[in-house]
């Protein structure tokens, strides 16, 4: 609007000055006409320079002022022929109003120009006098051109609108994105972009029909539109994909808003979030958000993933810690409930790291940062390699032990082609047996229906590695899925164990899980055991394995070795079973862990 109105002003000013300078005649007021043209030139220059910063209402003032300036020029021009020629400038006013204002506002501006055009020519003071109908032709042309331009402009704008939802389509969104990038570059403001895709939307069309699918899209569009601010731009970018442009918004604010939008609808959604950096094009911004959306799909759907062009201080610090190996891995014993409740039969590797940039960050928050800033591959490899190396150290130092090593794996990594081969390389490099490695994946990630992830799981199991479903009971639990997924162990989420309280019956679901695992021939590990009573109830229900603070916290491998040293179970050919005093000995293949 500012560029178009400014261009009309500048063109009118230049032509006005030119015709004033060369037109013959000494009637009228040539200086006044020249002054009006000069004012138009100055106003046009200000619009071109500062117009985008002006409020929308200011453009009404500029357009009305242009109408008055044209009228002054027509009224005071030195000769009659030139005055009639100058009346053609009313067409500029009609075009500008029809393009950028509503029909009612445009009609008011065109009507004002029409009235002045019909009035000014007959009342010109310079002889010869003009009849009343002189202004009909320029007035009629002004109205006609204004109407045609208005209709064509609205037809063009409707080409930017998605007919089904009433939102912008991809063409309209790309146009708005280009304008927003220009404004962000000029004003040094933030700009965030979100791409959202409805999960498994094709199944809605296949099973319920396209009419039902259209209804879902309309309902989602209506719900989200009500939650957005006036300066937010939502578009149906194609199919079941939506795009959201958020001016003056940070990445973290965009993530929070995206989570609100996802929570407001009943269908599952995956989203990729990114932000614009100076010098970047709109296509690059969309491509980066699309990468985040792809990663969200690969990680199990129904989540938001940030694909940022700049790293937070925490991400930078984490990158440095990974590069120099400054991360710690601690180990929490997994104990057998069927052999006295104290024999450790495995350990779970747990990442430990203290950040100076964000000391309060949790391990879960650290993993999310690693996933968002493309650090998860290196982090997963570091933890797995360190854990295997430490486990080999334990095994070589105490050859009576026969422990399993449990290590968590990110869903993003599991969905990467070649992940199974990378695990095999680490096992070969460290010497840890595949049969004693358990990879833990959260239930939602294991149920992601990613063919690559499932293929990796089958390959790993074929090579001897066992798969544990972590936090079982909190994801997409399904008997059919559980029976078909490549898995060996269930780790019951600690929220179920926490529900075991003295004086109250055990939660029925725990008994169901125990029976289910037995029917499917799956081992079960109960997480979060904190009291003797919880341990007793789990043993009575038939659970064979458990871990938690009741048995031991997590410890560095050096403390585990010290603990084993205290039990006098160090491997030594000169030490026999009779050399260990009664009460101090520990059954083969296990030990009483640190309290």
Image (spheres, grey):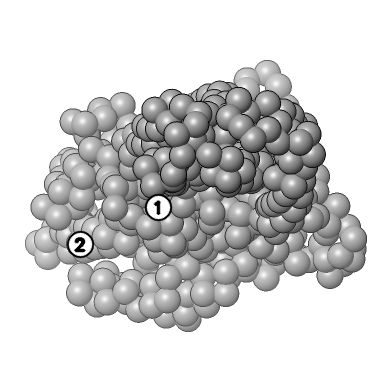
Give the quarter of the figure containing the C terminus. top left
Q: Residues within 10 Å of mark 2 (few under 14, many from 20)?
A: some
- x and y percentages locating residue 322 in the rendered image: 19, 52
Residue 359 vs residue 59, the one in the foreground = 59
Mark in front: 1 vs 2: 1
* Disc nearer the start of the sequence (1/2): 1
Which residue is tagged 1?
Answer: 307
Q: Is residue 92 above or below residue 523?
A: above
- Residue at coordinates 70% horizontally, 63% vertically from top-left? 239
- Residue at coordinates 45% horizontally, 34% vertically from top-left? 26
Q: Which residue reaches farthest top?
A: 503
- x and y percentages locating residue 186 in the rendered image: 33, 39
Residue 430 visible in the snapshot: yes
Q: Is residue 577 above or below residue 49?
A: below
Question: How many numbered marks are there?
Answer: 2
- Residue at coordinates 38% horizontally, 77% vertically from top-left? 418
Q: Is residue 509 above or below residue 485?
A: above
Q: Is residue 162 above or below residue 116?
A: below
Q: Secondary structure at mark 1?
A: loop
Is residue 468 rendered to the left or right of residue 277? right
Is residue 574 rendered to the left or right of residue 509? left
Residue 153 vs residue 61, the one in the foreground = 61
Image quadrant assignment for residue 356: top left
Is residue 265 rendered to the left or right of residue 212? left
Image quadrant assignment for residue 554: top left
In the rendered structure, are the residues bearing label 1 and label 2 in contact, judged by CB atoms less than 8 Å apart?
no
- x and y percentages locating residue 260 in the rendered image: 61, 34
- Residue at coordinates 58% horizontally, 45% vertically from top-left? 81
Which residue is tagged 2?
Answer: 389
Residue 371 vs residue 7, the one in the foreground = 7
Residue 583 vs residue 53, the one in the foreground = 53
Q: Which mark is residue 184?
A: none
């Amino acid at each position: 609007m500012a560029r178009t109105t400014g261009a009309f002003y500048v063109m009118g000013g230049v032509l006005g000055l030119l015709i004033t300078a060369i037109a013959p005649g000494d009637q009228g007021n040539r200086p006044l006409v020249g002054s009006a043209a000069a004012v138009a030139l100055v106003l046009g220059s200000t619009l071109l320079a500062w117009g985008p910063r002006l409020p929308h209402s200011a453009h009404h003032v500029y357009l009305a002022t242009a109408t008055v300036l044209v009228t002054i020029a027509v009224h005071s021009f030195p000769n009659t022929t030139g005055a009639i020629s100058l009346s053609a400038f009313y067409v500029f006013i009609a075009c500008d109003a029809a393009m950028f204002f509503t029909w009612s506002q445009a009609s008011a501006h065109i009507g004002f120009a029409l009235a002045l055009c019909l009035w000014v020519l007959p009342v010109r003071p310079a002889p010869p006098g003009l009849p009343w109908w002189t202004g009909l032709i320029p007035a009629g042309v002004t109205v006609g051109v204004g109407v045609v331009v208005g209709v064509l402009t609205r037809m063009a704008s409707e080409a930017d609108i998605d007919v089904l939802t009433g939102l912008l389509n991809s063409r309209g969104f790309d146009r708005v994105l280009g304008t927003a990038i220009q404004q962000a570059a000029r004003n040094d403001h933030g700009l965030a972009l979100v791409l959202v895709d409805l999960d498994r939307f094709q199944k809605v069309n296949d099973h319920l029909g396209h009419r039902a699918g259209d209804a879902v899209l309309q309902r989602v569009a209506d719900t989200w539109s009500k939650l957005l601010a006036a300066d937010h731009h939502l578009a149906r970018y194609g199919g079941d994909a939506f795009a959201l442009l958020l001016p003056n918004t940070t990445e973290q604010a965009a993530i929070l808003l995206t989570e609100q939008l996802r929570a407001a609808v009943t269908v599952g959604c995956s989203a990729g979030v990114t932000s614009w950096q100076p010098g970047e094009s709109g296509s690059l911004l969309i491509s980066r958000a699309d990468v985040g959306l792809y990663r969200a799909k690969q990680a199990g759907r129904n989540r938001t993933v940030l694909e940022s062009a700049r790293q937070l201080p925490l991400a930078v610090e984490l990158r440095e810690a990974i590069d120099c190996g400054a991360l710690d891995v601690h180990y929490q014993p997994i104990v057998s409930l069927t052999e006295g409740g104290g024999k450790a039969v495995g350990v779970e590797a747990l990442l430990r790291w203290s950040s100076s940039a964000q000391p309060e960050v949790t391990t879960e928050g650290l993993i999310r940062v690693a996933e968002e800033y493309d650090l998860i591959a290196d982090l997963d490899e570091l933890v797995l390699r360190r854990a295997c190396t430490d486990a080999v150290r334990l095994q070589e130092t105490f050859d009576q032990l026969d422990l399993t090593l449990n290590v968590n794996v990110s869903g993003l990594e599991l969905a990467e082609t070649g992940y199974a081969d990378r695990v095999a390389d680490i096992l070969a490099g460290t010497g840890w047996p595949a049969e004693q490695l358990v990879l833990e994946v959260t239930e939602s990630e294991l149920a992601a229906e990613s063919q690559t992830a499932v293929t990796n799981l089958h390959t790993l199991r074929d090579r001897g590695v066992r798969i544990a479903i972590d936090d079982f009971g909190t994801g997409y639990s399904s008997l059919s899925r559980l029976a078909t997924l490549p898995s060996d162990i269930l780790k019951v989420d600690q929220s179920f164990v926490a529900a075991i309280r003295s004086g109250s019956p055990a939660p029925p679901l725990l008994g169901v899980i125990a029976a289910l695992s037995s029917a499917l021939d799956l081992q079960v590990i109960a997480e979060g055991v904190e009291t003797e009573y919880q341990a007793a109830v789990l043993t009575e229900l038939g659970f064979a394995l458990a871990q938690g603070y009741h048995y031991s916290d997590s410890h560095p491998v050096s403390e585990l070795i010290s603990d084993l040293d205290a039990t006098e179970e160090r491997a030594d050919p000169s030490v026999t079973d009779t050399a260990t005093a009664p009460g101090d000995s520990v059954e083969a293949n296990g030990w009483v862990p640190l309290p």
